Image (cartoon, rainbow, N blue to C red):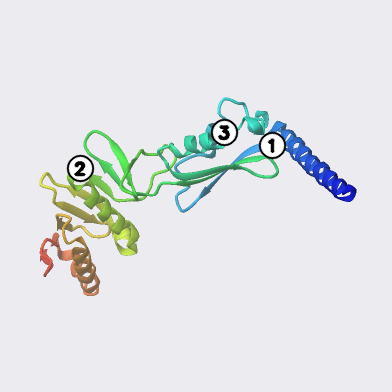
Amino acid sequence: MKRFNWITIRLVLMFGLVIFLFSFTSNRNGNRKLTKAKVVFVGENSSFLKQETVNKLLIENNDDASAIRKDKLDLNKLEKAVSSNQMVEKSEVFVTVDGVLKAVVKQKTPVARVFDGKRSFYIDYKGNTMPLSAHFTARVPLVLGVIRKKNSEALAELFRKIHDDAFLKKNIIAIQIMPNGSLKMLNRNFDYQIDFGGTVNMDTKIRNYKAFFQKAVLDSTLYKYKKIDLRFTQQVICTK
């Protein structure tokens, strides 16, 4: 019985010591201040935002990160603040073991630049709008005209297809949205206009154009054309 009591007392003491050390360490760690703030941009698009812009969101009203105590940090709030920036697709904010407040940021991917007569903005890969950057201009097709709600998803899909296709991304430099919704496109190296029609059957039209181009470029006939008509899915009509 005495042996049992002594073992129980030892376990209680050891358990209490562990709780004390954990509380002491946690309190001491919480009172420590951060060493610095660090911003890391990931992905292909890392030029729209400056590190200073994200850094200001991290340190809030403090002069620098070294003035911030760990126990005063609201990482969830900071992450939401960074992710709410219109240039940011997603972010992750955390504190490293050596006291660095770190933000890993992925910026949005623009697939088209729109000018609707009143304002200019980008369409990102997900089909949402994003503002122009004062620090960097993306090489994406210039879209002239108004994007209406009824055709916004289809146009965003077309912009993505152009962006993801190496040939189209290199060659399609401008798209004009006509009042009736049909599309006119311009090629980088040739003077002809591409009459794309509406967004219906876009995959077939793209395949037809690429097949026509690969054949026509071999005999140098592309320089003779003023218009390439893709509206008819069974054929490509060229006008000199």
Residue farthest to the right? 2
Can you give x and y, in whole percent of width and height, for residue 214 in the image?
A: 25, 72
> Disc 3 marks which amino acid?
Asp
Q: Is residue 234 left or right of residue 4?
A: left
Identify the residue at image location x=11%, y=44%.
Answer: 179
Q: Earlier in the sequence, mark 1 or mark 3?
A: 1
Circle 3 — which element? Answer: loop
Circle 2 — which element? Answer: helix
- Determine which residue is flagged by label 2: 149
- Determine which residue is flagged by label 3: 74
Place residue 199 in its image quadrant.
bottom left
* Crowd tier of the residue under label 2, counting other residues whose Cα lies within 10 Å: few below 14, some 14–19, many 20 or above: few
Is 89 located above or below residue 171 in the figure?
above
* Crowd tier of the residue under label 3, counting other residues whose Cα lies within 10 Å: few below 14, some 14–19, many 20 or above: few
Identify the residue at image location x=68%, y=40%.
Answer: 99
Q: Is residue 204 left or right of residue 101?
A: left
